[in-house]
Image (spheres, rainbow, N blue to C red):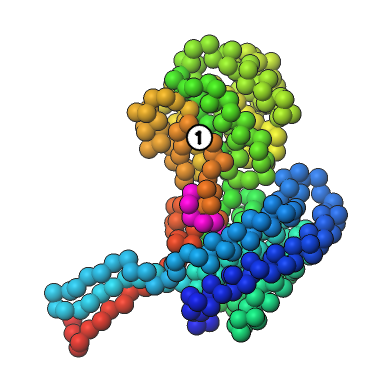
Amino acid sequence: MNTILSIGKRNAVLSRMSELLEQERANIKTINQQDLSNYSGDDLAMEKRLLVDDAKIDGMILSMQQLASQEDPVGAERFHFIHENGLKIINKTAAFGTIMIIYESRPDVTVEAGGIAFKSGNKILLKGGKESLLSNLKIVSLWHQALTDNEIDTNWVEYLNYNRDETQAFLENPTQRVDLIVPRGGEQLIAFTKKHATCPVIVSGRGNNFIYISKEADLQKALSIIINGKTTNIGVCNALDKVLIDTNLENWEIFAKKLVAELQQYKVIILGDEAFAKVTQVSKIENEEIWYEEFLNYKIVIGIVNSDEEAISKINKYCGGHSASIITSNDALAQKFMEQVDCAAVYQNASTRFTDGGQFGLGGELAISTDKLHQRGPIGLQHLVTNKWYVYGEGQVR
């Protein structure tokens, strides 16, 4: 394992990286265009994640600058205890060692997730998807330049240009030490990683998020929150997939028709349960299994419930454990909903699109975990650490 780099060195690399991204902006976009023209798939969400434009590069640069200015997450004291025999026992945060990030189609992950893991004192292994290979290799060359410019070994950031079989072989029998793996992508990638990995894996990236419209909802807020959650970015895990409406909402049928008309303006495919489809004339869902699905597309399922309890229980049955929101002016009900719904992030009167490390004030994120160990929800710099006990004695024996 590499000896941990000083915080000064880590920050210098991140600052240099932000400069290089600016300098190489035009080249990065040109190379990314090659990846885009090589991409022959018809997955709209994948294509959107693959694109690197000026706004994405601005985001990468900002994340490097913010990371460079944040406090060192390593070596922070978490616990301090003086034993009756005089032993001084201290617990401090510590780096994991080597973190492997496996991801699909998002060159910005090469910068942002890599940066968070690096700032946390870790060596990085990056395994991106073949569709973004040229963009990723270009960005990794900038990492290597930033490291070299600061007289640091380039093996702190390594790109694994492996196909599926080589990746599986590495996961099952790593040729170097790996302490933690973070897969970022669809369900197949996560299942593949969990099946073959021999070290801890943080599951990240699956959504299937719900919004519940209670009988005391502000319907104007409800409409704009649903449109925002469904249409602003379909290819992300905090996008909206399901809506539940309480039948105790006054004139819920009128609201249902208005919601359908609004979604249709955005060309969203709308499926309803029996009651909703009957009122609005949308297509009826053919199979209850669809409630488990994350769409990553202009598609939504809307159903009705007869009580708050039914809404909570339906969300807990079908959601991905990521995000759920209640639209209500009843704060007591909102609190009950938020306490009882089993998601990493729960909301009152706001869009699920805010579940994001940058939006939550973490200064970026490595991933959004739907696991309960070791961290839940957006994983920021301060969460990407393990811990270590320091015990100081003067000859004590037990």
Q: Is residue 296 left or right of residue 40?
A: left
- Residue 37 seen by the camera: yes
Span colored in magenta: 360-366
Residue at image location 17% in from the left, 74% down from the top: 83
* Residue type (three-letter) at the residue carrying disc 1: Ala
Q: What percent of the width, then of the height, locates residue 247? A: 50, 16
**Residue 341 shown in magenta:** no
Residue at image location 44% in from the left, 25% down from the top: 328
Q: What percent of the width, then of the height, locates residue 46? A: 73, 49
Q: Which SS type dominates the magenta stretch?
A: loop
* Location of residue 152 (image quadrant): bottom right
Q: Secondary structure at mark 1?
A: loop
Q: Is residue 222 left or right of residue 61?
A: left
Count of numbered badges drawn on the protein = 1
Q: What percent of the width, then of the height, locates residue 319? A: 53, 38
Residue at image location 50% in from the left, 43% down from the top: 321
Q: Give the answer, above or below, for where 352 lies relative to 179.
A: above
Q: Quadrant of the C terminus?
A: bottom left
Nearest the eye: 263 or 27: 27
Q: Which residue is mark 1?
A: 350
Q: What percent of the width, then of the height, locates residue 390? A: 31, 77
Q: Give the answer, above or below, for where 33 lies relative to 353.
A: below
Residue at image location 53% in from the left, 21% down from the top: 219
